[in-house]
Image (tube, helix red, strand yellow):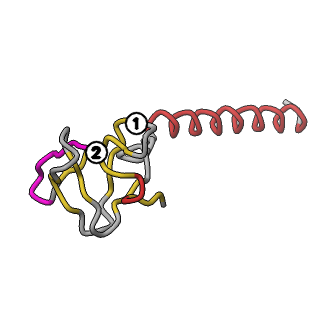
Amino acid sequence: MTNKSKTIAFLVIGALLLFSFKSAKRKGSIIVAPLQGNNIYALPGGNLYGVDPSRSIYTFQGGELLTLIQDSGMGDYQIEYYAPGGEKIQGYINIFDTEIK
């Protein structure tokens, strides 16, 4: 083999190794996505309401991450929240009681 063909062979082998490591890395990688899929947080004193809007289910301390289920389009979000005890609470919160970070 001449020097030119050796160089080409090394380049081809190097390219194959590079692509094999790159594809193996992609196969083993983990896609990290937001757990809730949104970034809506409760403001201090924000109230979570059930079906009856005159009765508050939970009052937020502020900074709690909320999972958006549906935007009612009428000034309320239907959300899901895991309370500190691990209890899952679903209800409605006024848009003005939330902030988007």
Q: Earlier in the sequence, mark 1 or mark 2?
A: 1
Is residue 50 toward the left or the right of residue 21 in the image?
A: left
Q: Quadrant of residue 88?
A: top left
Residue 3 in the image, given as x and y percentages of width and height: 88, 38
Instruction: Please state which of residues 100 and 9 is positioned toward the viewer in this rendering.
Output: 100
Q: Which mark is residue 9?
A: none
Mark 1 to mark 2 CA distance (whole Å)? 9 Å
Q: Is residue 89 magenta?
A: yes
Residue 94 in the image, given as x and y percentages of width and height: 36, 52
Q: Is 44 above or below relative to 25? A: below
Q: Amino acid at mark 1?
A: Ser
The residue range painted magenta reads 84-91
Q: Amino acid at mark 2?
A: Tyr
Q: Residues within 10 Å of mark 2 (few under 14, many from 20)?
A: many
Mark 2 secondary-structure assignment:
strand
Is residue 8 toward the left or the right of residue 65 in the image?
A: right
Tell me if label 1 and label 2 are in contact, CB under 8 Å.
yes
Q: Which mark is residue 72?
A: 1
Mark 1 secondary-structure assignment:
loop
Name the residue at 41% across, 47% down: 34
Q: How many marks?
A: 2
Name the residue at 47% across, 33% down: 27
Q: Is 28 above or below relative to 40? A: above
Q: Which mark is residue 92?
A: 2
Q: Quadrant of residue 30?
A: top left
Name the residue at 23% across, 52% down: 48
Is residue 87 toward the left or the right of residue 93 in the image?
A: left
